Amino acid sequence: MTKLLEGKTIVIMGVANERSIAWGVTKSLHNAGADLIFTNRQERSYKKLVNLLEKHEIEAKLIVSCDVASDESVQEAFGKIKDEVGTIHGLIHSVAFANREELQGEYADTSRDGFLLAQEISAYSLVAVTRAAKELMTEGGSIVTQTYLGSERVVPNYNVMGVAKASLEASVRYLAEDVGKYGIRVNAVSAGPIRTLSAKGVSGFNEKASIIEEKAPLRRSIDQDQVGDATLFFISDLSRGVTGEVLHVDSGFHIIG
Ligand code: NDP
Ligand code: N5H
């Protein structure tokens, strides 16, 4: 039997290390037979990625550097992908950033610069990469981003990032309408708390993670592999009738009042 993603080329943005959600996605897509292209911002992430790929015997089609804060960097990265690979069928956006000092205390204290930075890296970046990727999706495609419940509810400490994720989820809907006519779908996975590099050192994480085990219908924590498989569903044709959607992969926590 042919695999779900045989013959498909997918770009994955946001592997920082083995704990990254994007690494969980990498394993799911690789097991489904996809050819993978990666983008990193920091040299440190590039080195971690190269080691991980070697350890898991996964061969990347291409690894390019991309800082989503820069239009030139995004253009250069997708230009390189176009020149060296050509057509792509999917894109994983697993990138976010906010200043650590704004992920605590009151949201009302968010600075103008901190607000704009969180929006730029965590929400506008999806707009910029969708615009660049759609040129390479000549056979249609699927774009998947990663979001969190703090966009819908007030989650202590998530603050400026909650507002950025609300913007990201609204962008998913507007972008889905824009690119639907080209046979491209845009969806988001809303994961429950997962201990990653980004989550390290931000206050409130432990508390949020333990509530899931107590209160979520499934009473167990969420891991990168669960998010990877849900993302695989969105990338594959199994979800061909779905676009503009936000799917919660959170042991059902979001339904509890
Ligand atoms: P990681 O720290 O593993 O990944 C975050 C990634 O963002 C890093 O690879 C980092 O790249 C990248 N990044 C930050 N700024 C830029 C930039 N300017 N240009 C390009 N890349 C950038 O954390 P996660 O896997 O947890 O985060 C991935 C996504 O999942 C985020 O959108 C996050 O909000 C979301 N999410 C996470 C949850 C969790 O509990 N962990 C829950 C729900 C959603 P580099 O290392 O090269 O700087
Ligand atoms: C309610 C919570 C816990 C509190 C809030 C956490 C928010 C985290 C999101 C952002 C993306 C974290 C962040 O930007 C950290 C940076 O300031 C510092 N870290 C870094 O620079 C590292 C080295 C790099 C790799 O990180 C990035 N992002 O580039 C939310 C949690 C329960 C769930 C959660 C952790 C959600 C989420 O969106 O990640």
Image (cartoon, rainbow, N blue to C red):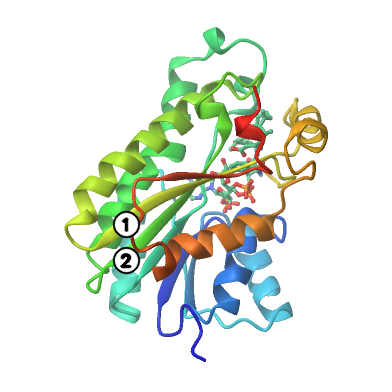
Determine the residue located farthest toward the left in the rendered image: 181
Q: Nearer the viewer, residue 16 or 244?
A: 244
Give x and y (percent) for residue 35. 47, 80
Viewer-nearest residue: 159 or 197: 159
Q: Is residue 127 left or right of residue 59?
A: left
Q: Secondary structure at mark 1?
A: strand
Label 2 lies in ligand 1 vicinity (Cβ under 8 Å): no
Secondary element under disc 2, as helix, strand or loop, is strand
Q: Quadrant of residue 182?
A: bottom left
Where is residue 66 shown, x and y percent of the image?
Answer: 44, 57
Q: Where, quadrant-wise, is the C terminus in this rendering?
A: top right
- Residue placed under numbered mark 1 in the picture: 185
Question: CB of mark 1 within 8 Å of CB of mark 2?
Answer: yes
Quarter location, residue 57: bottom right
Tell me the number on the disc at residue 13: none
Query: Residue type at mark 1?
Result: Arg
Q: Mark 1 near ligand 1 (CB under 8 Å)?
A: no
Please, is residue 119 above or below residue 59 in the view? above
Displayed quadrant of residue 221: top right
- The 10 Å Cα crowd at callout 1, few under 14, some 14 to 19, many 20 or more, is many
Q: Residue 73, how many percent across, how many down? A: 36, 55
Q: Amino acid at mark 2?
A: Gly
Residue under label 2 = 141
